[in-house]
Image (tube, grey):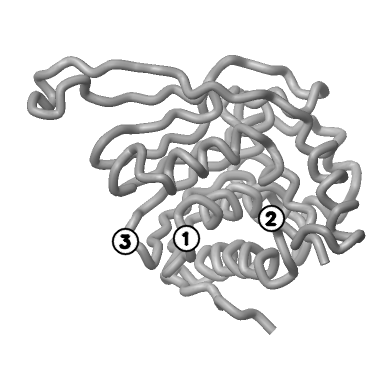
Amino acid sequence: MLVGHHRRHNPLVKAAHDVVTSGQIGNLLAVSMMWTLMKPDRYFDIAWRSVRPDGGPVLINLVHELDILRYTCGEIDQVFAQGRSKARGFEVEDSVSISITFRSGTVATILGSDAVTAPWSYEATTGENPLYFNVPENCYYFTGTEGALAFPQMELWSYPDRDRRGWQHPMEKSVVPVSRADSLTVQLAHFCDVVRGTRPPLVDARDGARSLAAALAVLESISTNKPITPSIDPA
């Protein structure tokens, strides 16, 4: 079984994963993600999108941010989240802040809202979907002891002289080269390989279930106002 987390098939996401997991930015300490955009009013003409148990940006959208975090940072240890529906007053949240700790000791935050006038989202910055207005901005920041990566512009920041580090010393920026490709096309080709039995699925059922468990833990944290540990092996 192949779970359709199509972002993992985007060469930009693969490149970010490789930069982080190869140690190129040193020991990964902290990650910051933004998913801030404006969903048009007609989006909510489909009733289930604004009510529990299936609606809301955590389950519909931010599950993909959580999946990318698991892909790059490892398994999640705990989440604590706050959510509100200040803009629309729906049953589901329109704005959320999520604090995450990983088994590795890395920490991360996600700031998300589908009711704001802002360009900082995966959809707007990657240009993956031509239906979205595209801006050359970043939405994810991976920071480590030896460098930092701004995604999706793939800007790599570091000190040119390792013996001269600290806030008083200049940093340099380089760009990680990435060959672009349509993630859905890449995913479909991969699915064909999975069906033929020539490749294992990039995201199998257990992997997909763990990302869903992380999203459900976020919703549980919002409703209980408590830190929640996701189920690593959900039933």
Residue sitting at x 60%, y 32%:
12
Q: Quadrant of the N terminus?
A: bottom right
**Of marks 3 and 2, the one in the foreground:** 3
**Image-based side of 39 in relation to 216, left or right:** right
Amino acid bearing label 2: Val
Between residues 97 and 170, which one lies in front from this camera angle? Answer: 170
Amino acid bearing label 3: Gly
> Mark 3: few, some, or many residues within 10 Å (few <14, many ≥20)?
some
**Of marks 2 and 1, the one in the foreground:** 1
Residue sitting at x 21%, y 24%:
159
The residue beneath circle 1 is 74
SS at circle 3? loop
Kindly tell me whether residue 179 is visible in this rendering. yes
- Kindly indicate whether the residue at mark 1 contacts the one at mark 3 (C-beta within 8 angstroms): no
Q: Is residue 228 above or below residue 202?
A: below
SS at circle 1? loop
**What x and y, as percent, mark residue 74?**
47, 60
**What x and y, as percent, mark residue 174?**
39, 17
Between residues 171 and 38, which one lies in front from this camera angle? Answer: 171
The residue beneath circle 2 is 92
Could you give the CA–CA distance between mark 2 and mark 1, rounded to whole angstroms?
Answer: 28 Å
> Mark 1: few, some, or many residues within 10 Å (few <14, many ≥20)?
some
Residue sitting at x 18%, y 15%:
170
Could you give the CA–CA distance between mark 3 and mark 2, rounded to whole angstroms?
Answer: 31 Å
Q: Is residue 117 above or below residue 79?
A: above
**Which of the 4 quarters of the picture holds residue 88?**
top right
- Kindly indicate whether the residue at mark 2 contacts the one at mark 3 (C-beta within 8 angstroms): no
**Image-based side of 227 in relation to 222, left or right:** left
The residue beneath circle 3 is 105
First in sequence: mark 3 vs mark 1: 1
Residue sitting at x 15%, y 28%:
162
SS at circle 2? loop
